[in-house]
Structure formats: structure tokens, C-alpha cells
Amino acid sequence: KNEVEQSPQNLTAQEGEFITINCSYSVGISALHWLQQHPGGGIVSLFMLSSGKKKHGRLIATINIQEKHSSLHITASHPRDSAVYICAVRMNRDDKIIFGKGTRLHILP
Amino acid sequence: DGGITQSPKYLFRKEGQNVTLSCEQNLNHDAMYWYRQDPGQGLRLIYYSQIVNDFQKGDIAEGYSVSREKKESFPLTVTSAQKNPTAFYLCASSEQVSSYEQYFGPGTRLTVT
């Protein structure tokens, strides 16, 4: 079993829809990251969370430490949001970072 | 502009040849990392360096080598011993290894035939 699981693996939606991407993990963590990888391959850090909720523009990230679960929401989605979204956790036990396999999001105009 | 550069974007090599991927950062970060990304898999750590002249193996170091002679530079050599070298390689840096946030380069796609 992977220590970091993302769902769904792939998501196609219409422009304007509210998007939710989920990340579950099975280990104790000190922080969780949401990353965005565009088709060209470069990766951008969106959020770093250790508790609660963060918002940046149309993006919202939440984390529930007790349930070992985080969600990334995109409001009023746009074709330029099409990318792979990656969840990564920093483990308490050895400070290593484990990456999820990513969720491929495609927003149709 | 501060950031991480990787070159080249695309690299093609024949099997049996060693190849070196470049990674440079001007963020004044102490820590640097090399990751490998394969389709359908999460990023996997190849090597990391906490400071100049020091580096540690990650989870999949076999067939790879690195050097850290300068703070700004962390080149990765993919040797002929790497059994499946075709992949997308990403370099990253952070202020320290214990820092929460990593900054990524644009990546190099290596194809070995």
C-alpha cells in the first residue's frame, strides 16, 4: 500500500466547475504540500499545510490531521488549471518526503 | 530572477554512454535534490546534498552519481550501470534539508535508446 494515495487519478471537468482533489496518507507527518505540474514538466509549490486551511485566489487547501486527509479545491475552474496536481508529505519518523502519484486534471472550455 | 535552471530540456543518448544533467540555482539554498519521475509513479529521490562537498543517497541511487563542488551546482551523472535510465529528471533546492518548501527546476527528459 502506498503511503500517500491521491484520488481521483484523472479528472475531466467543464470550465467553471468546482474541483476537489483528495490526498490520504498513512504515516505521521509534519507537513503536507500541494504541487502543480504543468504539461511542460516544471513543478510549482501551491501550498504547505500542517493544519487547518489555506486559500490563494481560486485555490483552497484543507487538512484534517486526525483523519490523515487533505483536499485541494479549485473554484470557478478554468482551462489554464489543467495540470497534474501532486500531494507530498514530510514524514515525522525520518523527515523524508513522499510524493503521491498525482491527479491529472483537464478542464474543458 | 532567482530560480533553478536545468539543461538541456531534452537529452538523447545511446545505451552504454554516461550522461550528465546540469542543475544550477541562484537562491543561495544549502540543500539540493535530484528526483526521477516515471509515468504513473510519484517522484522518487535519487540523491540529495545538505551542503557543499556532501551528498547522500536517496531511495534509488544505484546507477547514478553526483557532485557538489559549488553551492550553486549539483550535476547528476546517469551512468551506463543504470538499467532503465529513460525518465524525467527534476532538480530541486531548499534553504536546508529540514526546510518544508522545495523549489523545483523545469526538468530534463532523458531518452536512452
Image (cartoon, coloured by chain):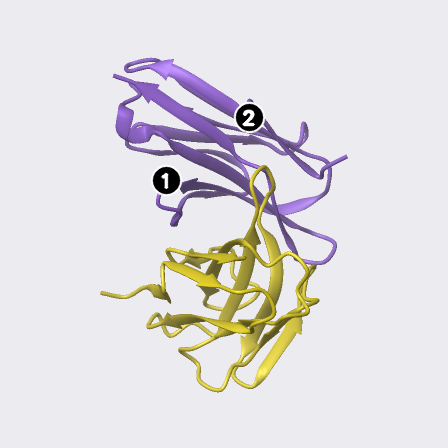
Chain colours: A purple, B yellow
Which quadrant is the N terminus of chain A positioned in?
Answer: top right
Provide the residue designation for mark 1.
A39
Query: Could you say where residue B85 lies in the image, as x and y percent from the top left?
Result: 59, 59
The residue lying toward the viewer, choosing from A29 and B89, is: B89
In the image, residue A44 above or below residue A74 = below
Report the side of A101 relative to B6 (left or right): right
Provide the residue designation for mark 2.
A9
Look at 54% across and 63% down and name the residue there. B34
In the image, residue B58 above or below residue A106 = below
> What type is the residue that disc 1 sits on?
Pro
Q: Earlier in the sequence, mark 1 or mark 2?
A: 2
Query: Could you say where residue A66 lies in the image, as x and y percent from the top left?
Result: 68, 30
Residue density around tag 1, few if under 14, some if 14–19, many if 20 or more, within 10 Å:
few
In which image quadrant can residue A3 be found? Answer: top right
Question: Could you say whether the residue bearing mark 1 is in a helix, strand or loop?
Answer: loop
Indicate the chain on which mark 2 is placed.
Answer: A
Of the two numbered discs 1 and 2 in the rendering, the one whose residue sits closer to the viewer: 1
